[in-house]
Amino acid sequence: MSKFSPILLAIILVLGGVVFIQYKHSARLSDERDRYKQNNTALLSDIERIKVDSTTMAVDAKALRLTIDEYERFRAADAEKIRQMGVKIKNLQAAAKHQLEVAAPINAVIRDTVFIRDTVPVVQQKVEMVSPHIQLDAVIDNDSLKGDILLPVTLQQTVWVEYKRKCIFWKKVKAIHQTISSDNPYVDIKYSEYIQIDKK
């Protein structure tokens, strides 16, 4: 019986190794399947628009999960822009992109003002509008409006996880969301994208 002990031990070790490799392979395939399902759901779902209050609008979009190779293949232009900013793609954790549109009504007061040019006072019309969301300061000079317009905006980005409960104590990630809000009612978030980079 002692002659068979080393052989039996070797067989047990080999079988244990095979089971461990199969388990790791199965776990990797399961993760790939879940990632594929999440990406399909994210690509097929629309952006949800949320009115937080009278001045704050938010959008909610599901996130994509890509590997570094997938990101460089499917988002080549974005990857090139990131490289131009001095960031190494291999160090990327996540990438977000937002498209904003500004459409603000102008209701400004026109009044006369005096400027001194070469010691000569010159009367011009000044256009001014100041509100919490729009600041316009300009003059009418030779049938042209010249000046500055400022629309201050703060974007707030939140990344959160939506879980699907399998049982009371175990839950599984259903989707990763990105919610982004604008505090300026004249700034509309037309498109928002969040890509989480999977390190594999």
Image: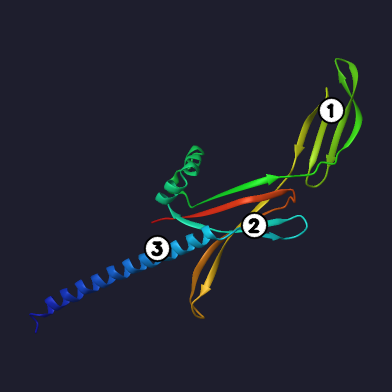
Secondary element at tag 3: helix
Label 1 close to label 2 by CB (< 8 Å) = no
For disc 1, the neighbor class at 10 Å (few under 14, some 14 to 19, many from 20) is some
Q: CA distance from mark 2 to mark 3?
A: 28 Å
Question: What is the three-letter code of the residue carrying label 1?
Answer: Ile
Q: CA distance from mark 1 to mark 2?
A: 39 Å
Label 1 close to label 3 by CB (< 8 Å) = no
Q: CA distance from mark 1 to mark 3?
A: 62 Å
> Which residue is at the far left?
3
Q: Which residue matches tag 3? A: 32
Using residue 56 as the reference point, say whether residue 8 is left or right of it. left
Q: Which mark is residue 140?
A: 1
> Which residue is at the far bottom?
1
Q: Position of residue 200 (x, y in %)?
A: 38, 56
Q: Residue at x 86, y 39 (%)?
A: 108
Question: What is the three-letter code of the residue carrying label 3?
Answer: Glu
Q: Residue at x 83, y 29 (%)?
A: 139
Q: How is the image coloured?
A: rainbow
Question: What is the three-letter code of the residue carrying label 2?
Answer: Val
- Work out whether residue 65 or residue 106 is closer to the camera in this orientation and state it: 106
Establish if 63 lies above or below 73. below
Establish if 199 lies above or below 147. below
Q: Which residue matches tag 2? A: 59
> Which residue is at the far front?
44
Using residue 167 as the reference point, say whether residue 55 is left or right of it. right
Q: Position of residue 47 (x, y in %)?
A: 61, 58
Q: Residue at x 78, y 31 (%)?
A: 147
Secondary element at tag 1: strand
